Amino acid sequence: MRVAFAKSAGLALVLNGVIWIAASVIGLVPALGESTFFGGVLFASVGATAAAAIVASRFTAAGARKRWAGISLAILLVSFASPLALGAGNLPISPFNPTDTTYNDFRGGIGIAYAILHFTSYIAVQRFIGKQIPE
């Protein structure tokens, strides 16, 4: 599971890093040096795959992969609520400073980017960690 975690985290880091860089270049999200969002994206990419690896290690019975697939898909779909709420203005951009409006112009772009990053992390997890679970 450790090797699968490392591969999954690496893939999530690369995919999410490239997507965030591209989004910053086209002006969808703040520029890389302008904020700490990029570091947060990389941290969250590793954190998501680590959490998935911890949970996946509990799925050891025969036939567990089908249950894992259903549960992980449900979690992905529920996880879209936060980027959608962020983009719609129902969540603060910074949970640490909810009154900060510095990046309000990027609210929609950040929400879209976060939704995409949730999906790419899911793909990375399924590609490596999900395959470690018994069929």
Image (cartoon, rainbow, N blue to C red):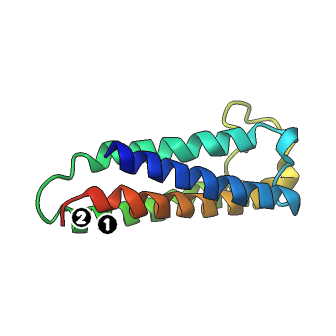
Front residue of 90/127: it is 127
Q: Residue at label 1? A: 69
Q: Residue at label 2? A: 65
Q: Position of residue 62 (x, y in %)?
A: 11, 62
Front residue of 88/14: it is 14
Residue located at (28% from left, 57% from top): 132
Residue located at (55% from left, 54% from top): 12
Q: Where is residue 107 in the image (x, y as percent from the top left)?
A: 78, 55
Residue located at (74% from left, 42% from top): 37
Q: Where is residue 2 in the image (x, y as percent from the top left)?
A: 35, 42
Q: Is mark 1 on a helix, strand or loop?
A: helix
Q: Position of residue 83 (x, y in %)?
A: 63, 57
What separation in Å lies between label 2 and label 1 (alpha carbons)?
Answer: 6 Å
Q: Residue 12 carries which label?
A: none
Vertical relation: 21 (above or below) 123: above
* Residue 52 in view, yes or no: no
Residue projecting furthest to the top: 96
Q: Name the amino acid, label 1.
A: Ala
Q: Name the amino acid, label 2.
A: Arg
Q: In which quarter of the image is residue 54?
A: top left
Q: In the rendered structure, are the residues bearing label 2 and label 1 in contact, judged by CB atoms less than 8 Å apart?
A: yes
> Which quadrant does the C terminus fall into?
bottom left
Front residue of 62/84: it is 62
